[in-house]
Structures are given as C-alpha cells and as structure tokens.
Image: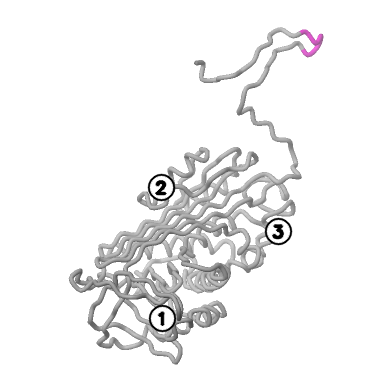
Amino acid sequence: MKQFSKAPQTVPFFGAILAVFLGTSTLPAIAVEASPAPLVEGNSAFAWSLYGELASAEGNLFFSPYSVSSALGMTYCGARGATANEMKEALRFPLAPEQLPPAFKTLNGALLANARKDKQTLNIANGLCLTGGDVSKEFKALLKADFDAEIFPGDLNTINAWVKRRTEGKIPKILESLDPRSVCVLLNAIYFKGIWENPFEKGRTHDAPFNISANHQVTVPFMARRGGFQILEKPDFQMVAIPYSGKHLSMVILLPKETEGLAKLEKQVAQGAGQPWLAELDVAPAQETELSLPKYKLETDYDLVPPCKNLGIKEAFGAQADFSGMGWTKGALCIDQIKHKAFVEVNEEGTEAAAATAVGIRMTAIRQCPIFRADHPFLFLIRDQQTGTILFLGRMVDPSGK
C-alpha cells in the first residue's frame, strides 16, 4: 500500500494523453479517524477503470474522476444492502461505510491545503439539492459534517446556477432536465487554476503539425521550454511531470512513441499499469529536457449511467435499489441519471480546469405511495364530508395572485 505522504498524486484530471494530478508531495499531518490513503488508492483504481470505459468513444476525452467519486461517494452513503455492495465494489471503496466519509473530509482538506500552500486555486464543493422530496436528518447531517455539503431546495435552474457559480462559470449547465419524480440531486463541483513552476515563454510558441494519425495532421500552436523535468522512458512511451508553482501539483503526460500507439497505452492503463508507472516517475531524477506541448482548450459532456453499469453498479438504477440510508424504504428510490461535464485550458501561464457531477435520485416506478404534485392549474373545492355538500369550489391557475 502506498504511504499517506504520496496519496495526493493519485487524484487526477485525465485527458486522452494527459492527466492533471492534484498534489505530488507530502500531505499535511492531520489527525483523522480513518486514513485517506486507502481511499486514494481506491479512487485511483476507479479512475483508471472509468477511463477505460470512456476511452471506447473516439475523440478527445477529459473528466474529473475525483468529482465522480465524490458525488457517487455521497450517494453510496445512503445505499444499503446489495445496492451498497455493488457501489462499493465498482467505485473501489476500500473502507468500511463509517470510515469513508471522514476519509473524504480529510482528503479534501489535504488537497485544499496543498493548493493554498502553493498559492494555487483549487475549489471543491459538494451539494444536495432537494428537488421534490426530502431525505432523513441523519443523511443530511452526514453530508454536512463529512462532505461539507450545501443543502438547499430547488429546481433545474437552481442546480445549474449552483454548478456555474462553483466552477467559476466554466460549467454553465450540468443538467438538461429533471424527472417529475425527482427527489434530490447530489452534486460535486471542482475548479482548479494552476500556474506553472516555470511558465513557457510566449515568444517561443509557434505553429507546428500535430499528427492525429499516420495520415492526418493539423497545425496548432506549440509551447516550448528547456529545463529539468522528471521523465520516465519506457520501450513504448514516455512520461513527464510538469510541476505547477510550489510543486505540490503537477501535470503528467503519457506519450506513446508511435503516432498510433495510444490505443495500446490506454489498454495497459485500464488494466492497472498506470499506478506502477506513476510510482516509478515519482522517484525518477530530473533530466534536462526539451519540452514541447500544444496549447489546447476543450469541453466534454458524459452520461455516466452506461459506464457505471458496465463497471458493476446495477441495482441502484432500478426498482430493487436500496437507498434506505436516505430515510426512504427499500425500493422507493433509485438513481435516474449521472451527468458529468468538464473543461480544461492549457497555455503558457498554466492550466485552468473545472468539472461537475450530478447524481439524480428519483422515486421508482413501483412506489410505496402515489405522487401528487400540484405544479400546474387545478380545480379545488371545500366540502362537508358528512353530507357531501360542496361549500366552496374554484380553480387555481396562478398561485402568485397575479
């Protein structure tokens, strides 16, 4: 097992040929009930496996596995029985249910402390929006205490406004719709803005070809800098760590040596090779290197229900789901959507990245009780139940009184 001092480097933002690691040095010493080191290792294993699911689609790829783990981690805290077991296994959570929330709290604090120490910007926010029902006081108390979650009532606009604010406007909308049976939405938003330890000189930026394939090139701006970087040479690829100011955070790039070697590399990391390689890179000496990196900006949008099902979360999406830890009976609630969006921009000064994850919880189709939501015009009356006499009769079209 990795030592606690190395834990933060395994909380990445992944791209198709890059990973932004939120921390590459010692975590501050914090007294905790449950060490976050096992959580970091589990989150990293989940990150690589989720990457493997998302990589099957063509084109650019970028997401925040830490955001996904956080949002689904909060959801898991309300799961019980077989539903909880499936989520625990798929999300690679190694800790007992009572240890997981404080481990997340400690890890969040450590990540934020490292960023503050280096005067970098890192914001991590969790939320619970009550969209049509309520959850137990115990569940809300847990989210507040260990995930520092904001708990608020609202609708689709409220949720999207929260995400936009928490990602500095980089993710203006996370959800397109809410199910009429929606009870709540669990939210995570993460925003990072880092300045390179040694920024690239703008005067050295120049247009050059980027080889998409052996037969397809595009011309893009490339940044260039010569300096000492930790670099790892393998037969089929290279790895390099580019530190942000203060060196608690860095960007790590995995570059196949063959133009069309990415698929093989992705297969290897999906099978678990990524973590050992990172361990090697950690102890690799700095070497004088001529570094050339394209400038880029991209935005991504994912429906995570299919990949989560592929990874083994099945029961949580149907009538057999057990979210009784949220204060509802078994079978009353299920997950109806998991949406994730991400943004990244890399330039001469540094990197700006943001991501948000929303996990929608709704009542199941087979319900313990009917739904009655008077959110459109209706008739109403007041009657004497004994005699059946209608005393008052009317209709409501606009409850605002206009």
Residue 229 at what x, y percent from top left? 29, 82
Q: CA distance from mark 2 to mark 1?
A: 33 Å
Decide whether residue 387 is among the magenta residues. yes
Q: Which residue is mark 1?
A: 255
Dot 1 falls on a residue whose secondary structure is strand
Q: Which residue is mark 2?
A: 164
- Tell me where the magenta segment starts and ends, as one range: 385-389
Please identify the quarter of the rendering in which residue 280 is found.
bottom left
Residue 66 at what x, y percent from top left? 47, 64
- Looking at the magenta stretch, what is its main secondary structure? loop
Amino acid carrying label 2: it is Lys
Taking 141 as reference, is 257 left or right? Answer: left
- Residue 139 in sight in this render: yes
| Relative depth, front residue between 202 and 122 | 202
Amino acid carrying label 3: it is Glu
Q: Are marks 2 and 1 in contact (CB under 8 Å)?
A: no
Q: Which residue is mark 3?
A: 315
